[in-house]
Image: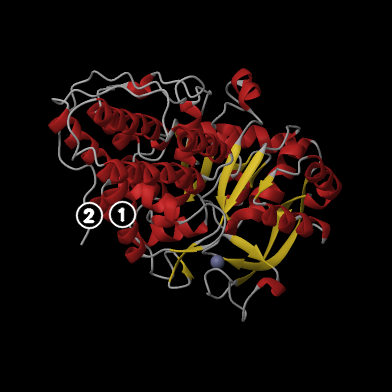
Amino acid sequence: MTTPIYYVNDAPHVGHAYTTLHADISARWNRLKRNEVFFLTGTDEHGLKIAEAAEKLGISPQELTDSTSRRFKDAWNQLGIKYDDFIRTTEPRHIETVNAFTQKIYDAGYIVKDTWEGLYCISCESNYIESELENGMCPIHKRPVEKVKEDNYFFKLSQFEDRLLKFYEDNPKFIEPETKFNEALSFIKSGLKDISVTRSSFDWGITVPWDHSQVFYVWFEALINYVTALGYSSDPDRFNRLWPNTVHMIGKEITRFHCIWWPAMCMAAGINPPSKILVHGWLLVGGEKMSKTSLNKIDPVDLVDEFGLDQFRYLLVKGSPFGPDSEFSYEELKRRNNSDLANNLGNLLSRVLAVVNSKCDSITPKVDTDSILKPAADLAVESAKENWDNFSPANALEAIWNLLRATNAYLETNEPWKGEPGEKVNKVLGDSLEVLRIAAVLISPVMPTSAAEILTRIGLTNYLDDVSLSDDLGWGQYPGGFQIKKDAPLFNRIK
Ligand SMILES: [Zn+2]
């Protein structure tokens, strides 16, 4: 599971957090399934833009990237991102891999020298053709592009048209959603041009191994990070075991690099392309993409401070389903926090525990194997599993919340807080505790701390450590007989 490696000139904002959080959730879901997971993120650190920024500050590019890369690490730690590896493109392991990987492509005859003339957006570190510009400006950054002419090395992308088409045909789920698959496919069908992959006008990059007067174009070497971290040049056994069983999560602005360049580069180097690329839309603020240049970026750490860590994770994932663009709004986060978290899940937990306290001497009743909630629970488990597996966390959460709402309604119908202690009250509470047990397991990829806390409060300390998704999510397993742990409400309402 990978995120893009983020370009270090920008500070981490909610847009970066969105991709990284989705990758984290998917990695956690797969760990819960006891699958072997390797979750990779990192930073992209070469290119003209970094060299210029460092020069302005009077420090070396390496000094600049050391401090700016750390901002991403810090942000991910504060967002509870449990990555297995954080790669930096300035690390020796990456430089070694780029040398080996590109040499392979060069030796196969797919990299050749030629003259490059083109339009270049320094903010994107990307080339454009005239027709892609909007009013002569970069369509993403709305800033002027530069005319550039250089003698460079070219990757013969045009020679991969047929192989890419065949690969797309054989792998109809290679890119999701389908709209992005179709866009990439029609881009290939419209004809591919060779691409310039080196630069001679600046030196903050990885030196071309067969021509020390050139450095690699930042995108061309950055993509190779995905195989660096798996041991392409350092540990072939590990690499062959893990590659190409890889899921790349990316934002839609970098589909051309990932869906066309990268699979062709893999083919040119003699390895299979990655197995899947998941493309998501943009988080919009007032209709505009969140970015450094448009000054509308939101620091995710500020939102964690305000809402709490698990709350922020839930709100971001639930409010902006993976795939289309979605408007990011603070009011909406607040509304959802109060309705879904405080009034629904939080309220269910505190009500159940309060009644266990008042009617059962704080000892939890066990679940009844027969319950009106059983079909709703079975449905929630099935739907959540399917949606987690299909990278639709927002839908997985919706399925779980349907069960939580049904359980709150069940409590309101039966009003155990009014009943006499005894069998009927015990049954209602046992059923509700069973829902809390099941729901806590299912929400744990998004809200790991809250899930563990819910389980602890109902007597199931460390339950997630060895829960089995195949054996333990069926109805009727909450054993009861535990002393409840009383504490402050799990989620606060925000006024
Ligand atoms: Zn641009």
Q: Which residue is at a point 76% across and 44% down the rendered structure image?
A: 172
Taking the image as shown, residue 391 lies to the left or right of residue 10, namely right
Q: Which residue is at a point 41% across and 60% down the rendered structure image?
A: 53
Taking the image as shown, residue 73 lies to the left or right of residue 348, namely right
Q: Which residue is mark 1?
A: 337
Instruction: Bin the neighbour count of mark 1 within 10 Å (Cα to Cα): few under 14, some 14-19, many 20 and up.
Output: many
Q: Position of residue 80 (x, y in %)?
A: 34, 39
Q: Quadrant of ligand 1?
A: bottom right
Q: Which residue is mark 2?
A: 493
Taking the image as shown, residue 20 lies to the left or right of residue 257, namely left
* CB contact under 8 Å: marks 1 and 2: yes
Q: Position of residue 178 (x, y in %)?
A: 69, 52
Three-letter amino acid code of the residue under disc 2: Arg
Spatial CA distance of label 1 from label 2 is 7 Å
- Which quadrant would residue 397 be assigned to in this image? top left
Residue at the bottom extreme, as displayed: 135
Q: Which residue is at a point 33% across and 64% down the rendered structure image?
A: 330
Q: Does any portion of residue 472 appear in the rendered image?
A: yes
Residue at the right extreme, as displayed: 162
Three-letter amino acid code of the residue under disc 1: Asn
- Which quadrant would residue 99 be assigned to in this image? top right
